[in-house]
Amino acid sequence: MRWLRVGDADAGYLTTRGVECLRWGMTTPPELIAAWISLQRWYANKGALPQLEEIGSWQLAAEEPGVEIVTHLFIDHTLGKPALYQVPLAYRARRLADDRSLVGVIDGRFAYDGPHDPAYTSALLALITGELEVNGDRTWVLGNHAGEPTPVARRVSRVLTGEQSNTSIVFEPESGIGAPIICKVFRTLHDGDNPDVELQSALAAAGSDAVPRPVGDVLAEWNDRGQPSGRARGHLAFAQEFLPGAEDAWVVACAAAALGTDFSAEAYALGVATAGVHATLAATMATRETTQHDIDAVIALMHGRLATAIGEVPALAHHAAALEAVFATAATVSWPAQQRIHGDLHLGQVLSVPARGWVLVDFEGEPLRPMRERSRLDSPIRDVAGMLRSFDYVAGSLSVAGAAGSDYDAERAHSWAARARAAFERGYSEASGCDLAENRALVDAFEIDKALYETVYEARNRPGWLRIPVAAIERLSARSATA
């Protein structure tokens, strides 16, 4: 196989988006595609060229002549911890007018990133809505429709921007008749059901309108030397109704905070919606009483996170005794039952939908955790703490903007966040029957834990934002000292 730089058959290297990547001596597809993967937002090991091994592939039939659609599964052995990536490519005999998604040229064919190629996107939607089964190279794939398999009218597609770990494709009906669909293609694959598919499907099946209605998904099996059976099974894609006119709750909240507009009613409703999702998950999926072993394990992780945060920000050692006192108190109080939760809840995972209210999305949990860990039962208080931190981040983001020269009123922003937090807690408490005020030590412990996680992240990645979690730690430690 000969890979060429696009438009220059005499070149001795492949250039992807202006970056010199590969020399002629590297002639196998995994080595060649590594350069392109290293530039993608969903590639985890930034700064290192992935060491790829292809473990399987599968093909979809393209309606368009001269196009071959192949999805490759590549394990990256970089840094000693394997990661499995899904790389769908559309191989074309002719070059597209828009070359922004071009990966390279192989044997005279132009290889495009699948989600950006209409041949791939239409075949993917047909796989889901038609419930097709595909046997590939060491790979088995099944498209699952949420209802009866039905033909779908021709649609045009576009890719959403800004995502880190997945690629989402929006399908709009070409005729204008029918509802739009959004399909998330999971770039990093794991053994086990993806909680984004599992939880949202369970919620929708139970009649909840707090999540988008599922359309279908793609399930696959592939070779995995790390599994006792030698095979792994997981989700490749998930399609749902697309909600036109929906606004990101983070954007809505930031706009309100910037204007000083009270957000209490919206925060209260979000608390009610969160409690409703928790109640439905508890009613339809597994739960169990929280044991002392569970509590001790969580508290130990909190202490570990504190030690890590102090290592990054030594000044936090001044608050260590007060924070440890919160953890100690939390270990002695009653905890709600363990259940399935969102796992990574914040304002960026919520949509404001006209005539429908708040809708929760992205139930994947933390993307870098193994799938089976993300599917474990956990405390619903973790989701509560995540949302409380998110309100603080809205106010804190105004502080960051203020430091850059924008008009900023620190007292007004702090007051805005305090009112929103109180309203959210009130809505959740009334809807769930779990009075958060009476469980203050437990809520504070989970919020401190989240703020410590944020501290480590900001110290390593966004030092300009470090003041946001540190201020929360100072506030929560002060409350502990005066309790």
Image (spheres, grey):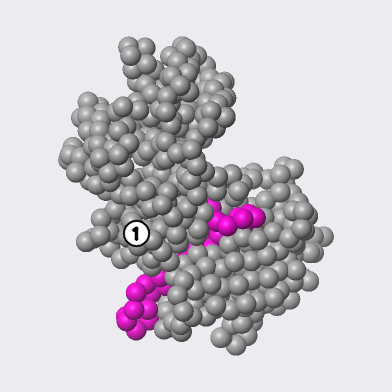
Q: Mark 1 = which residue?
A: 208
Position in image of residue 259 (x %, y %) = 19, 40
Along the viewing direction, whichever of 335 and 272 lies nearer the viewer: 335
**Residue 179 occupies quadrant:** bottom left
Q: Which image quarter is the N terminus in?
A: bottom right
| Highlighted magenta segment, given as a residue range | 165-194
**Taking 23 as reference, is 474 above or below it?**
above
Q: Nearer the viewer, residue 165 or 223?
A: 223
Q: Nearer the viewer, residue 467 or 275?
A: 275
Q: Is residue 301 visible?
A: no
Residue at the image position 33 percent from the left and 45 percent from the top: 275
Could you tell me which residue is drawn at 43 percent across and 66 percent down?
A: 214
Circle 1 crowding by C-alpha within 10 Å: few under 14, some 14–19, many from 20? some
Tell which residue pokes out farthest to the right in this image: 25
Viewer-proximal residue among 110 and 332: 332
Residue 413 to residue 361: above or below? above
Count the numbered circles shown.
1
